[in-house]
Structure formats: C-alpha cells, structure tokens
Image: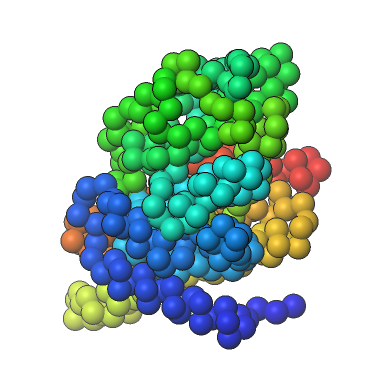
C-alpha cells in the first residue's frame, strides 16, 4: 500500500497549483467567466487532463486527473469557474472521447482540450432529475440523422456553450435502453438557448435551459450507437463523481489554511480565538472531513484506473466530499464569526458554492441508495 506521490506526480501538482494562482490571483468579480479565463484553463492543462494525447489531451488516468483538478480547486478562488471546467471535461469531453465517431473526436476534442470551445451537458429535464431513465426529450429517426424535440432544464455552461452532449429518448417503451446520446453544436437549426438562471452559488458558471425544436443532428454525431445513452451517461458520471469533486478537496485545503490563519490572528478576551476549544474543535473537524474525503476520492480514482467496478467507491467518495465540504463551510463561517458572513474574506461564498455539491451529479440520497445496493441491502 502506497500513500505517497512520485516525483513526477508531485511536480505536476506543484506546477498546476502555481500556474493556477498566477492565472487567477484575485477573487471573481461577480460576473460570468470569460473566454480568456477558459483559455487559461486550457493552458494550465485542466480541460484536457484525461483526454487522449492524440486529440490534444494529457492522457492522464483518473487519479492523476483528480490531482490536477484538486490543484486548480485549491489555487483558483473562483469555484464556479473550476466547476464549469470540470463539468465540461467529465460530462462532455469524456463521452465524446470514449464514444464519439472518429470525425467528431478529431474535430472537437482538440478544441475542447485547449479551451477554444465550451461544452455543456444536457441531461436534466423538468421531470427527470435523479430519474434519468424517463426523458421527455425525443429523438426521431429521419434521413441522415435524428430530430430532437423537448427541453433540458438545467445545463451548466448552457448559455455559453458551443457544444452540447444531449440525451433523448428514441424508443419510450424501452426505458433506459431507449435513451441515446448526441453531440449537438450551437449553430444547429432548431436549437434554442435560454437565458442564464439566477443562482445561489457558483455565480461565475452560467446555467440555463436549452430547447430543441425539430433540431437535426447528423448520424455521425450519435454517441456509441442507438440505445447506449444511459450507459454512456453513467460512465461519464463515474468520472464526474470522482474527479470533479477533487475540486472541493482543493477548496477544503484552502479553507483549512484560512481558518488556521484567522484563528491565530483574531483575538477575543485577551487570547487568540484558536485557544478556545469551541473554535479549535471546529477546525479539527474540518481537517478530519478533508482527509477522510481525500482518501476516499483517491481510492475511487485508483479503483477506476485498475478497471474495477467502482460504483461503491465512487458513491462513498462523492457522498463524503459533498457532505464534508457543506458541513465544513458552515463551520468556517462560525470560525470567522461576523466576518464569515461578509463577502470580503470569501467564506460565505464557499458555503454557497458547497450547497449544490449535495445535489448535482446525483444527490446525496442517490449516493446512499447506491451504497446500500452495492453492499447487498
């Protein structure tokens, strides 16, 4: 059993962390990310970390990819931007790389890896969130391709995206076997992109609805064949639930540093507040959640790299990270007291950004159901 990183892995982490801090030295200004921000992420290597080298990626496995995302999550104060980039990579670029046709891979993957294109995952619908097997968006076969009709209600990166990975029902009677994945480009006739939602957190990541009105998708832009959509989506969710959540591990590293520094400097009743157990115990709990989540996440990614069935490991990791960062963000607000409620130190932003982690990529309750199913309950 090995708990250390080799020299190459540690050097990569240090390089990415330093590059991220240099590229994003200031907190977000409250607006959406820019194309310049996206290109910087491409230069740092996050967008193409796990994509094949022949398509402009770095060819890293799940564990090394997660370590890259962790470094960016620690170094970048804009969690919404890091989340947007991870969703772009794991929910969109990964299924294109694994299941796209060769012409689509060669045309899109180098652009996605470099940050010249932005991708959005279009799965969630008004009546299909956790239950993704009953999609109302339909895909009707026509000469040379398919016509998509219906609405996807919550597409991260949706208002800004150039490319969408969308899922629709070809055969409603077949259940999840009737779901098919498609690559839809923004200029497609019949694609209507909605306005950005106003959200609680992840403010720099635009999210909104997209609607298909007899939107034609060529045959070569079907992912993995008709009826393979549910399996493709679950494959991408494995990558997302494991590697995307590494950004929160990085964020927790930064949060621990901030809490320790504040507890050393802030004085009340003639003492540093870190000397009060009510404060120091909270920081100890944050550190415990961080290291527990980190180990589970690394274990899940290690299992993925070995080609094992990793449903249990990934669900445990996702649950530990998301619930851990939410509880820790709330504790950090209390450590900072009144300052934690102000925007100046960025602590309240961490809490707002942590809340959706228990919802997207499968809610915490879905993860619990996966866990008990895997252990035989």
Identify which residue is drawn at 39% across, 52% down.
116
**Residue 370 position by quadrant:** top right
Is residue 237 rendered to the left or right of residue 328? right
Task: Give percent across and percent down for residue 158.
Answer: 39, 36
Q: Residue furthest right?
A: 376
Quadrant of the drawing holding the N terminus = bottom right
Q: Is residue 275 left or right of residue 99?
A: left
**x 51%, y 82%: residue:** 11
Q: Nearer the viewer, residue 230 or 364?
A: 230
Horizontal side of residue 277 vs 314, given as left or right = left
Q: Is residue 251 visible?
A: no
Q: Up-down: is 54 above or below 204?
A: below
Tell me the quarter of the image containing the C terminus. Answer: top right
Instruction: Name the one closer to the observer, 170 or 338.
Output: 170
Kindly identify the residue that appears in the image at 21 percent across and 50 percent down.
30
Q: Quadrant of residue 265?
A: bottom left
Q: Position of residue 36 (x, y in %)?
A: 28, 57
Is residue 326 positioned above or below 277 on the image?
A: above
Above or below 233: residue 64: below
Q: Colour scheme used in the picture? A: rainbow
Q: Is residue 203 above or below residue 74?
A: above
Total number of numbered discs in the rendering: 0
Measured as percent of width and height from the top left, residue 70 is found at: 48, 66
Q: Position of residue 313 (x, y in %)?
A: 69, 55
In the picture provided, is 341 more to the left or to the right than 351? left
- At x 71%, y 48%, the residue is 311
Asked whether residue 204 appears in the rendered view, the answer is yes
């Amino acid at each position: 059993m090995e708990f250390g990183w080799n020299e190459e892995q540690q050097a990569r982490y240090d390089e990415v962390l330093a590059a991220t801090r240099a590229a994003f030295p200031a907190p977000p200004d409250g607006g959406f990310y820019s194309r310049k921000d996206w290109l910087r992420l491409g230069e740092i290597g996050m967008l193409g970390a796990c994509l094949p080298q022949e398509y402009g990626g770095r060819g890293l496995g799940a564990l090394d990819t997660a370590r890259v995302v962790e470094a960016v999550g620690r170094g970048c104060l804009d969690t919404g931007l890091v989340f947007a980039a991870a969703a772009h990579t794991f929910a969109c670029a990964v299924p294109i790389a694994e299941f796209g046709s060769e012409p689509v891979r060669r045309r899109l993957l180098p652009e996605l890896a470099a940050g010249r294109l932005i991708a959005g995952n279009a799965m969630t619908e008004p009546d299909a969130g956790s239950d993704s097997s009953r999609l109302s968006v339909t895909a009707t076969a026509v000469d040379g391709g398919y016509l998509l009709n219906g609405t996807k209600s919550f597409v991260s990166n949706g208002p800004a995206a150039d490319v969408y990975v969308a899922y629709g029902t070809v055969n409603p009677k077949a259940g999840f076997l009737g779901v098919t994945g498609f690559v839809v480009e923004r200029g497609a006739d019949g694609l209507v992109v909605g306005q950005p939602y106003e959200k609680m957190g992840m403010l720099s990541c635009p999210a909104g609805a997209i609607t298909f009105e007899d939107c034609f998708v060529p045959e070569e832009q079907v992912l993995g064949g008709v009826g393979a959509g549910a399996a493709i989506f679950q494959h991408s969710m494995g990558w997302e639930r494991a590697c995307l959540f590494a950004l929160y591990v990085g964020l927790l590293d930064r949060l621990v540093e901030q809490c320790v520094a504040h507890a050393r400097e802030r004085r009340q009743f003639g003492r540093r507040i870190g000397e009060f157990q009510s404060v120091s115990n909270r920081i100890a709990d944050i550190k415990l959640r961080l290291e527990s989540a980190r180990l589970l996440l690394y274990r899940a990614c290690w299992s993925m790299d070995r080609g094992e069935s990793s449903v249990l490991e990934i669900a445990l990791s996702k649950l530990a990270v998301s619930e851990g960062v939410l509880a820790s963000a709330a504790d950090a607000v209390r450590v900072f007291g009144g300052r934690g409620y102000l925007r100046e130190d960025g602590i309240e932003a961490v809490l707002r950004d942590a809340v959706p982690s228990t919802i997207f990529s499968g809610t915490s309750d879905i993860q619990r159901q996966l866990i008990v199913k895997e252990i035989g309950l």
